[in-house]
Image (cartoon, rainbow, N blue to C red):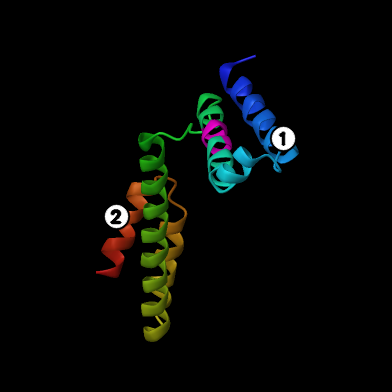
């Protein structure tokens, strides 16, 4: 049993004892402090337990890559939408055919480059 769980048990025992002996003059005097400190201590211990068990597994590098992928997808969607709007305004079937060809490209960077070139 780790020290965090022991700490939680001690905090729980203190809380129960304070509730049981709340008529005691000493407990009455410090009751308002106990109502603040006991939940704060419980939260602190639970946060420590969560961090130790791998609750914070996302590193900045992992998040940076995911964010960049999302940005690329949004950029691609914006370019595709602008090409479709331009083609719809001009009623240009040739532009729509080029867009269909570009959408079939598997490489994301090449697809983005061609979409940007098609937008102008």
Above or below residue 55? Residue 76 is below
Above or below residue 83? Residue 22 is above
Q: Position of residue 106 (x, y in %)?
A: 44, 46
Q: Quadrant of residue 61?
A: top left
Q: Position of residue 42 (x, y in %)?
A: 58, 36
Instruction: Answer with left or right where residue 10 lies relative to residue 117.
Output: right
Q: Which residue is mark 1?
A: 16
Residue farthest toward the top in the current orientation of the protein: 1
The quadrant in which the C terminus is found is bottom left
Pick the residue in front: 58 or 64.
Answer: 58
Residue at point 31%, 57% (across, down) = 114
Residue 88 among magenta residues = no
Q: Give the class, few, some or many, for how many residues have Cα within 10 Å of label 2's Cα (few <14, many ≥20).
A: few
> Which secondary structure, mark 2?
helix
> Which secondary structure, mark 1?
helix
Above or below residue 9? Residue 81 is below
Instruction: Answer with left or right where residue 102 lies relative to residue 113.
Output: right
> First in sequence: mark 2 or mark 1?
1
Q: Position of residue 53 (x, y in %)?
A: 56, 25
Residue at point 36%, 79% (across, down) = 86
Q: Which residue is mark 2?
A: 113
Residue range (magenta): 42-47
Q: Give the class, few, some or many, for how many residues have Cα within 10 Å of label 1's Cα (few <14, many ≥20).
A: few
Above or below residue 35? Residue 120 is below
- Mark 2 vs mark 1, foreground winner is 1
Residue at point 53%, 44% (across, down) = 33
The quadrant in which the N terminus is found is top right
Dot 2 and dot 1 residues touching (CB under 8 Å): no
Task: Look at the magenta stretch and give its main secondary structure.
Answer: helix
Q: Position of residue 77 (x, y in %)?
A: 42, 63
């Amino acid at each position: 049993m780790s020290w965090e769980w022991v700490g939680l048990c001690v905090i729980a025992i203190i809380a129960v004892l304070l509730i049981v002996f709340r008529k005691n003059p000493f407990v009455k005097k410090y009751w308002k402090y106990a109502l603040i400190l006991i939940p704060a201590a419980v939260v602190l211990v639970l946060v420590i337990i969560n961090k130790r068990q791998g609750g914070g597994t996302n590193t900045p590098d992992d998040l940076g890559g995911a964010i960049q992928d999302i940005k690329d997808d949004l950029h691609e969607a914006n370019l595709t939408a602008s090409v479709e709007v331009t083609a719809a305004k001009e009623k240009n079937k040739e532009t729509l055919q080029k867009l269909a060809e570009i959408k079939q490209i598997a490489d994301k960077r090449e697809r983005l480059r061609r979409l940007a070139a098609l937008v102008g």
